[in-house]
Amino acid sequence: MRWLSTGVADGAKLIGAGTLQIKEPGRAADPRHGAEIYAQVCAACHGVNGLGQRAQQGLGYQFPPLWGPDSYNSGAGMSRLLTLAAYAQHNMPIGTTFDVPVLTTSL
């Protein structure tokens, strides 16, 4: 794995590494609005029920479940609302880049 850091100085900050943070909104979450966004943006890959899409060949998932028995464990941090929101904003839908997010924190 040493090749991954070829040309990178020890301790260098890498652009795009890690999960970017988002500011906690000054309002309560709106489950109805969230359900609308999920249906429009997320359900095509993660399924209407949020249980993901299994890989057509081999084990695992092509698109992972967001809840249910095969979803992230609590150690992954994705069960934390702000962690999940930050990851989704900067990485979803598929093809999104961290510097040009599709999802926003505004209503």
Image (cartoon, grey):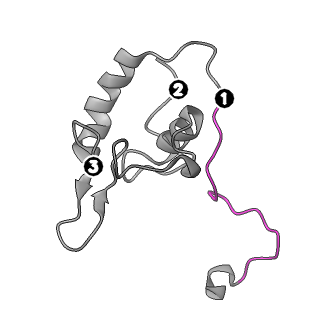
Where residue 52 is drawn, which disc sits there?
3
Where residue 7 is drawn, which disc sits there?
none
Give the amino acid type for the residue marked by disc 1 in the picture: Lys
List the residue tagged with mark 1: 23
Which quadrant of the structure image shows residue 86?
Answer: top right
Which quadrant of the structure image shows residue 34?
Answer: top left
Left or right of residue 23: residue 36: left
Mark sitting earlier along the chain (3/2): 3
- Calculate the distance from the C-alpha at mark 1 to the C-alpha at mark 2: 9 Å
The residue sitting at 21% across, 36% down in the picture is: 48
Highlighted magenta segment, given as a residue range: 7-22
Say above or below: 17 vs 78.
below
Are the residues tagged 1 and 2 within 8 Å (C-beta)? yes
List the residue tagged with mark 2: 105
> Is 83 in front, or is 42?
83
- Calculate the distance from the C-alpha at mark 3 to the C-alpha at mark 2: 24 Å
- SS for callout 1: loop
- SS for callout 3: loop
Mark sitting earlier along the chain (1/2): 1
Give the amino acid type for the residue marked by disc 2 in the picture: Thr
